[in-house]
Amino acid sequence: MVTAAAHSLPAALRARRAGVQAIVVSPVFPSASPSAGRAMGPLILARLVRGARMPAYALGGVDADNVKKLKMTGVAGVASVGALTRT
């Protein structure tokens, strides 16, 4: 599967035109990543997913405590780094 990072609807539309099969959208929630920008939250994520009209995966601050907030956003799945690497 070919994916692309898409942190906005215009970026998602460019990715779709380029032929990618899915997008990774971040940051959805506040993240400790030094490269993370401002968190968009579930409502903006849902609008982006609807507008992109392609599978989208949520990344950025996603963990066991907040993943349920993404249920109605239309994402195809989630990705996580920090939640999987904490000791």
Image: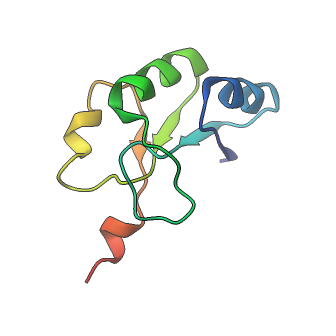
Residue at the spot 71% in from the left edge and 23% down from the top edge:
13
- Image coordinates of residue 12 in percent, x first then y, are 66, 29
Question: 14 left or right of 6?
Answer: right
Residue at the outermost left position: 65
Residue 86, picture quadrant? bottom left
Residue at the spot 40% in from the left edge and 64% down from the top edge:
32
Residue 20, picture quadrant? top right
Can the viewer see residue 39 in this picture?
yes
Question: 6 left or right of 25?
Answer: right
Residue at the spot 41% in from the left edge and 42% down from the top edge:
28
- Image coordinates of residue 3 in percent, x first then y, are 66, 45
Given residues 82 and 18, the one toward you in this image is 82
Given residues 25 and 53, the one toward you in this image is 25
Residue 31, picture quadrant? bottom left
Figure coloring: rainbow
Residue at the spot 65% in from the left edge and 47% down from the top edge:
1
Is residue 15 shown above or below 78? above
- Image coordinates of residue 72 in percent, x first then y, are 28, 24
Look at the image and tell me in which quarter the C terminus lies: bottom left
Given residues 75 and 27, the one toward you in this image is 27
Is residue 23 shown above or below 74? below
Residue at the outermost bottom position: 87
- Image coordinates of residue 59 in percent, x first then y, are 45, 49
The total of numbered circles placed on residues is 0
Can the viewer see residue 53 in this picture?
no
Question: 27 left or right of 5?
Answer: left
Question: 26 left or right of 42?
Answer: right
